[in-house]
Image (spheres, rainbow, N blue to C red):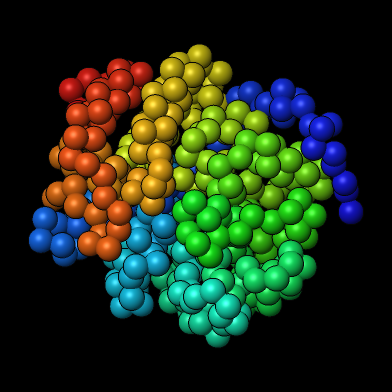
């Protein structure tokens, strides 16, 4: 086992210029003004994301997975696959439980079956049963789930996003990396330091493992070797794809576009953090890409006055990306 002292990590040494970045975008599930799902807008958004060269991820936090029943999750999977054909699809495997609930491996297995039916790579969402106890107990549960799938993406999630979230200690993270069919893990602690530690450990022990940043408050973590699986990107997958191309090409325009996208992240992901989904709906509605800016009826809302700020930031993104007249 490799032990890395956090004090010994120099972020500057982690920077990887001209690296090809891999991006996965959590797809917003849009709603109409009457509170029903805008499936037409959903399908168009999946298609637009894939056309930009970004892998779509459905039934994630951005897709209100914790608020959906299995029938709706299954419909999102079916429609996503129909749009993508043979293209890559990632999806959340979420089990709803409560504090003190036992680990429900069978419930995860049922989610895996739904995902396998459409050839989607699972992202294992934390549940209270999965994350209870110490890191060793959680990793043992991961290992049990790993035996049920060909490949999967792990998920560390701050409780800022979901009460059942859990962020492992660095030794626990190393144990997760040693699960052979765990191809990567989304890291959503919102901490640069913790992510730098994971990148350093990854580089030292398993270079093929993907650290997917989920830090919407520091999307430039891609400079240091992170890939990404973000909710913020659902507002403009094309701009994220352009940013990543500029990084791979060594084009300094990366910085201004990254700054503009980060401005949207800083505004949208302020507390209460789960209301960012309404901000994403506002952004897409301002673009004319979804039927309304309504969030899921049970999701936190942002004030209507946010639209003016978001419109200004979208204009900044367009200018940084070399586009005009989109917002």
* 54 sits left or right of 51 in the view: right
- Residue 293, percent from left and from top: 19, 47
**Residue drawn 19% across the image and 29% down it:** 308
Determine if residue 237 is in view: no
Comparing 222 with 192, the one in front is: 192
- Residue 156, percent from left and from top: 60, 55
**Residue drawn 69% across the image and 56% down it:** 168
* 311 sits left or right of 137 in the view: left
Extreme-left residue of the structure: 34
Extreme-top residue of the structure: 252
Comparing 215 with 184, the one in front is: 215
Q: What is the number of callouts on the image?
A: 0
Extreme-bottom residue of the structure: 106
Above/below status of 327 relative to 92:
above
Above/below status of 272 relative to 116:
above
* 296 sits left or right of 263 in the view: left
Image quadrant assignment for residue 194? top right
- Residue 187, percent from left and from top: 59, 49
**Residue drawn 42% across the image and 59% down it:** 60
Determine if residue 316 is in view: yes
- Residue 241, percent from left and from top: 42, 34
Image quadrant assignment for residue 271? top left
Above/below status of 59 relative to 49:
below
**Residue drawn 30% across the image and 58% down it:** 299
Q: Quadrant of the N terminus?
A: bottom right
Above/below status of 302 relative to 157:
above
Q: Quadrant of the C terminus?
A: top left
Comparing 22 with 102, the one in front is: 102
């Amino acid at each position: 086992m490799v032990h890395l002292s956090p004090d010994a990590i120099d972020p500057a040494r982690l920077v990887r210029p001209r690296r090809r970045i891999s991006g996965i975008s959590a797809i917003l599930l849009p709603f109409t003004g009457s509170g029903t799902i805008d499936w037409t807008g959903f399908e168009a958004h999946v298609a637009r994301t894939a056309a930009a060269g970004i892998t779509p991820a459905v039934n994630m936090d951005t897709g209100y997975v914790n608020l959906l029943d299995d029938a709706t999750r299954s419909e999102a999977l079916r429609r996503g696959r129909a749009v993508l054909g043979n293209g890559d699809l990632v999806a959340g495997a979420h089990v709803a439980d409560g504090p003190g609930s036992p680990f429900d491996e069978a419930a995860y297995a049922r989610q895996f079956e739904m995902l396998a039916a459409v050839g989607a790579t699972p992202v294992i969402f934390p549940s209270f049963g999965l994350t209870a106890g110490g890191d060793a107990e959680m990793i043992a549960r991961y290992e049990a789930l790993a035996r049920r799938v060909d490949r999967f993406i792990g998920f560390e999630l701050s409780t800022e996003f979901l009460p059942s979230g859990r962020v492992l200690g660095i030794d626990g993270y190393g144990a997760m990396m040693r699960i052979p069919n765990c191809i990567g893990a989304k890291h959503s602690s919102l901490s640069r330091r913790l992510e730098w530690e994971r990148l350093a450990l990854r580089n030292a022990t398993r270079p093929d493992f993907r650290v997917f940043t989920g830090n919407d408050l520091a999307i430039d973590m891609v400079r240091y070797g992170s890939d990404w699986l973000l909710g913020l990107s659902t507002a403009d997958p094309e701009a994220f794809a352009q940013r990543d191309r500029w990084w791979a090409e060594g084009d300094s325009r990366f910085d201004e576009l990254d700054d503009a996208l980060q401005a949207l992240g800083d505004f949208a992901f302020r507390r209460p953090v789960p209301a960012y989904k309404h901000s994403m709906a506002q952004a897409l509605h301002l673009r004319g890409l979804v039927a309304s800016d309504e969030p899921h009826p049970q999701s936190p809302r942002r004030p209507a006055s946010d639209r003016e700020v978001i419109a200004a930031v979208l204009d900044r993104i367009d200018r940084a990306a070399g586009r005009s007249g989109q917002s």
